[in-house]
Image: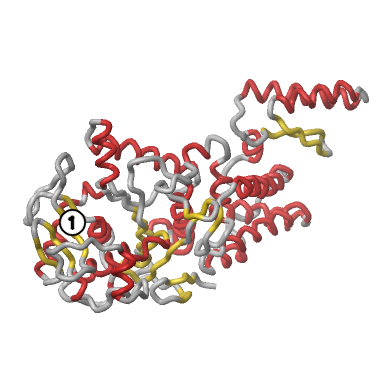
Amino acid sequence: MALSLYDTMAREKRPFVPADAKRVTMYVCGPTVYNYAHIGNARPVVVFDVLFRLLRHLYGQDAVIYAANVTDVDDKINAKALAEGVPISTITDRYLAIYNADMASLGALRPTLQPRVTQTMDAIITMIGRLVRNNAAYAAEGHVLFDTQVFGDYGKLSGRSMEDMIAGARVDVAPYKRHPADFVLWKPSKPGEPVWDSPWGPGRPGWHIECSAMIDEALGLPIDIHGGGHDLIFPHHENEIAQGVCAGHDHGRAEEYARYWVHNGFLNFGDEKMSKSLGNVVLVHELIEKAPGEAVRWALLVGHYRAPQEWSGELLTQARKSLDRLYGALRRAADVTPSTDQPSPAFVAALEDDLNTPQAMAELFALASRLETGDADGRAEAKGQLLASGALMGFLQADPEAWFQGGADDEFKARIDALIAERIAARAAKDWPKADRIRDELTALGVEVMDIAAGATWRLKEAT
């Protein structure tokens, strides 16, 4: 089976064929770095990390170039810098470092490229200049605006009419606009805000032009895959296409910007989309202090990426239990030597089917069952495939014992092992009261004892 992806532009699942199999390009809209990322922000990171891993598996690690931008010029960044009395770089450097560390804790590989707006300003100004020269943009009262009437494919990605797009974008009414749907490429900076010189006066770029310029400079057009959250389809990605295409020598077609558009669904909290503005956020930075990052990653992938997903404590608890099942199988098979380092064909086929992570997870459980019930050759193959399949999806990266005892230092582990040895001896002597007292002491220490045929093992209970 070959990789197929649901293409938002085509509104159907299509076989994936890169323009150049030796240089597969993917761009995903990244963070605006002014605060901690919430778990909703992490969903596209994890989803496209799986796609990045799969593309590297299919085409080779050196053949895939994945760029995820960093927005480090923004009203919220400006406000935070002003409140703290520091340059915007102090804010953005701080939160980008935190963001990268938090996403790494979820098993996300660092993108090949992580372009920043402030480091792409020359390219942004150059692209705006091309749009003006191509009569696709115009200067007015210190602003430069894109002329939406010159691009015939405007609205093709979202499937909206011009009237719907005007209403949906909640456009600003301004006397210098030629058309209500026209959007800002460059604007004057307010007092105290960062400012850059340009042919149209001092100011800073609009949001949409930033991504178009970074894609053009970092990857070149057209790119193979453009990804992001469903909420970015309009107006952000619609505007990206218009700018990126019209900055060329003619006002061409939308397909000249990206060959495939892939969008993930919202992560909801209760009945609402999770967002900082609504105040219903769960921060990744806090969550990973209470649960393994691998369990958080599992929870984000347990549903299909295109579907909306409900976030809850129960979802995370079930994710931990699922990984316990897989790590438990690996721990019980510690004496089995893997006979392969390749993922199972069924597992790869599941991911190739538009990143069907629920089916891929089912294949992991099937491999764990084979590992525990098969003959010697079957177990050796199953262990190798389980480890390789897990790695392809970003799971089963820890030592099984470390998974169950994660967070415990050597002194604590020695203490627990000594108590368990005492309990085993008490049980052997049929001193049940002493065995029960030791178990109660272990429980008070946050340790769960699991009796097995060979004696007993233990794990730390999940933090609450």
Q: Residue at x 21, y 47 (%)?
A: 119
- Residue type, mark 1 in image: Ile
Looking at the image, which is closer to me, 408 or 42?
A: 42
Name the side, left or right, on which 378 lies relative to 7: right
Image coordinates of residue 295 in percent, x first then y, are 58, 45
Q: Position of residue 148 (x, y in %)?
A: 21, 71
Q: Residues within 10 Å of mark 1 (few under 14, many from 20)?
A: many
Residue 222 can be seen in this image: no
Please, what secondary structure does the residue beneath circle 1 have? helix
Q: Position of residue 129 (x, y in %)?
A: 11, 62
Q: Is residue 327 left or right of residue 268?
A: right
Q: Quadrant of the N terminus?
A: bottom right
Q: Quadrant of the C terminus?
A: top right
Residue placed under numbered mark 1 in the picture: 124
| Residue 226 in which image quadrant | bottom left
Q: Quadrant of residue 24?
A: bottom left
Residue at coordinates 62% horizontally, 24% vertically from top-left? 410
Above/below status of 68 relative to 225:
above
Which residue sits at x=47%, y=38%?
Answer: 285
Give x and y (percent) for residue 418: 74, 21
Q: Residue at x 68, y 22 (%)?
A: 414
